[in-house]
Structure formats: structure tokens, C-alpha cells
Amino acid sequence: MPNLKLGIVGMPNVGKSTLFNALADASAEAANYPFCTVEPNVGVVELPDPRLDLLFERVRPRAKVPATVTFVDIAGLVERASEGEGLGNRFLAHIREVDAVVHVVRCFDDPDVVHVLGDVDPVRDREIVRTELALADLQTVERRLERVEKVARSGDRDAKKEDRLLRRLQQDLGQGRPASAVTPENDEEALLLRGYQLLTTKPELYVANVAEEDVTGTGGDEEAVAARNPHVRALREAVARDDQPAEVVSLAAQMEAEVLGLEPEDRDEYLREQGLQQPGLHRLIHAGYRLLRLISFFTTSPKEVRAWTITQGTGAARAAGEIHTDFERGFIRAETIAWEDFVAAGSEKAAREQGLMRSEGRGYVVQDGDIILVRFNV
């Protein structure tokens, strides 16, 4: 997975475009009416990683290339979107393309920013979005079932197996449960399930968009924010009741947009004044990495230091393939320095001299922060 792709979704006027503007410094029109984001805005954001900064400082190459995260700002969802209400099907088509869903939920009161349903109720808003996604998946499943059951009646063995899976999905989705609640019984079912691209199988996390005073002085501590904001408490309690509870990241999107508009030195000073250790958006990006079990490894050369994104548990040869397919095809070994050893030694040269560089085979499981030199021959 060379680039993580997150879709930002939610009801209209909850702060999605404001959040996107803060993330990508893009020009999405943050207007106070429901459907200002007609086409999805796409922004590529650098993964903040102080390890890469230190590596650049010590290696002194010509360039630094961070890992990136792609954010997609998708049009606001309303009730009956699965039936074409609002921007309906266009919303649903865009969300199928992302790796995971960031569900922005409004947790602030502001009479100047209208809510399409009148009052602020994050639990209700969350359920509307989840229900619409489940209904859209139910339509997908039922359309597929219509085709498969005809073949299954003829005695086709594969069709009969798929028919059983589709009926389990139909039952759960019809009861408002996500497709992720259906556990594949074997590898064949898992492959079929992935092929359906159902919306409610995608991993999700939540952004509680709060007022600036809710986060100031908390240091980004979620418990402290929840203690101040009853909307956040209600949202967290609702999410905790799910079969697969998701992470909730609280931030003030408007403040984040203003913070990231500052020069880096001014930004750090402002955050210190507000009692915050880092922008909330950095916490969001790292939450996305945790959600999909992603890690980074590094490569160095006189030309550049670069961060690469892989899934936890990836072997050395597969990781080498993220750099170039030839590296995986002709993999010989991975000369590896653990991040902690690099920091302790002070440089790659010193790590080698101290015997801290290891020669690892193709089955070695790459660890977060590993510095790797791939040896290959094609």
C-alpha cells in the first residue's frame, strides 16, 4: 500500500471541507450550504514523522521524501442518499474508492452555522450516515443475489456457495448491521466479499469536530476533551457499543485550518500557547495509520532519504517491491539497521562499524523505522 487513501464523510455543514482545507491546504469551498462539495476534492498530505527529519539531518542528502496520505473530501450525505437524495449515488461511488472512512461528526454549537436537521446531535448524525451506507450495500447485495440465485437453481456449486454468503449479508444489512459483521467462513468467501466493494466493510474512524475552547490546554488528551464536551462523550459512548469500536479523534477544524496556515515557527509557538503538543490533524493522520496497521521503513542515498509505507507483518522481499518491482523479483538480502540502533550509533557508518547492520533474508518481517538497503540482481 504505497499511499493511504482516506475518504472524509459526514452530514452537510459538520466541518468536512474546513477539515480538508486544513489537511491539504486546498481550495475546497467551505460554504454554509449543504452541497458545496459537488465533486470530491483530493489532497495529498505528508505523513508527519520526526524520524525522517532526523535521518535527513544526519545523512544530509539532496532531498527528503516523506510518505503521503491522500484525503478525499466527499459531498455531504443526507437521509435517503441510497435512494438518490442530495448527491446520493455520486457520494456512494466516490466512497467506494477509499481504503478507510473518516467520519466527521459535528460536536459544537454555533447558531451561525446551520445544521440541516436543526439541532446538534452527533449520535443521530452518525446513525444516519451508517444507515445510508448499509442501505446502499443492501442494494448492491440484492442486485448480485438476483443474478446468482438463478444460476444456483441450475445446480451450479460455486453459485450455491455465493448464494449462501449473499443471504447472510442480506440478513445483517437488512437489520442495519454493517457488512463487516459477517465473518467469511473460508478464503473463497473472503475473496468474494472483497470483490463486492461494500461500503460498510471499510475500516472507519471518527473525528469529533469541537469548539476551540474544548481542546485548548488539553495537550490533545481525548479524555480531557470529552470531560468538557457532552457531545463528544455521547459519540464515544455510541461508538464503544459497536461490535468493532473505532477510534475517535477530537479536534477543532477551524482552529486547525488557522494553525496550519501559519509559518512553521509561528505554528509551534501558537500550539505551545494553546497547551497543545501537535496539530490535531497530525493525530488524525497517525490514527489512520493505526487503523490500517501501517508502518514506515526508510531508505537512504546521497540523492534522498525516503519513507515507504507498508502493512505490519510485511516481509523484506515484499517491502522491497514497494521501492521497485525489480527489487522484489531479484531480491538477495536486505541490509537492515533498526531505528533505535541508528539513533544510538549516530549514523549509518557508525552502526555498520559497531556491527548493528544485519543481513536479512526475504522472509524477515520489516519493523517500523527500519533503515534498509536492498541488494538484488535481475
Image: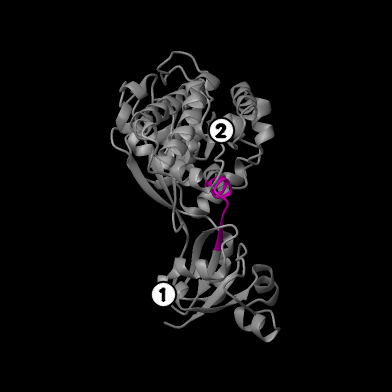
Residue 220: x, y in percent? 63, 40
Q: Nearer the viewer, mark 1 or mark 2?
A: 2
Image point (52%, 59%), residue name: 310
Image point (62%, 22%), residue name: 234
Position of residue 369 relative to residue 280, above or below, is: below
Side (left or right) of 321 relative to 182: left
Name the residue beneath numbered marker 1: 326
Element type at marker 1?
helix
The image's mark for residue 181 is 2
Residue 136: x, y in percent? 39, 28
Residue 82: x, y in percent? 36, 24
Residue 30: x, y in percent? 35, 32
The residue at the far top in this view is: 118
- Crowd rating for badge 2 (residues with CA inside 10 Å; few <14, some 14–19, many 20+): some
Marks 1 & 2, CB-CB < 8 Å contact: no
Image point (56%, 62%), residue name: 314
Q: Is residue 294 magenta?
A: yes
The magenta region covers 285-296
The residue closer to the viewer here, 337 or 150, is 150
Quadrant in the picture for residue 218 = top right
As shown in the figure, which amino acid type bears the numbered disc 2? Answer: Ala
Element type at marker 2?
helix
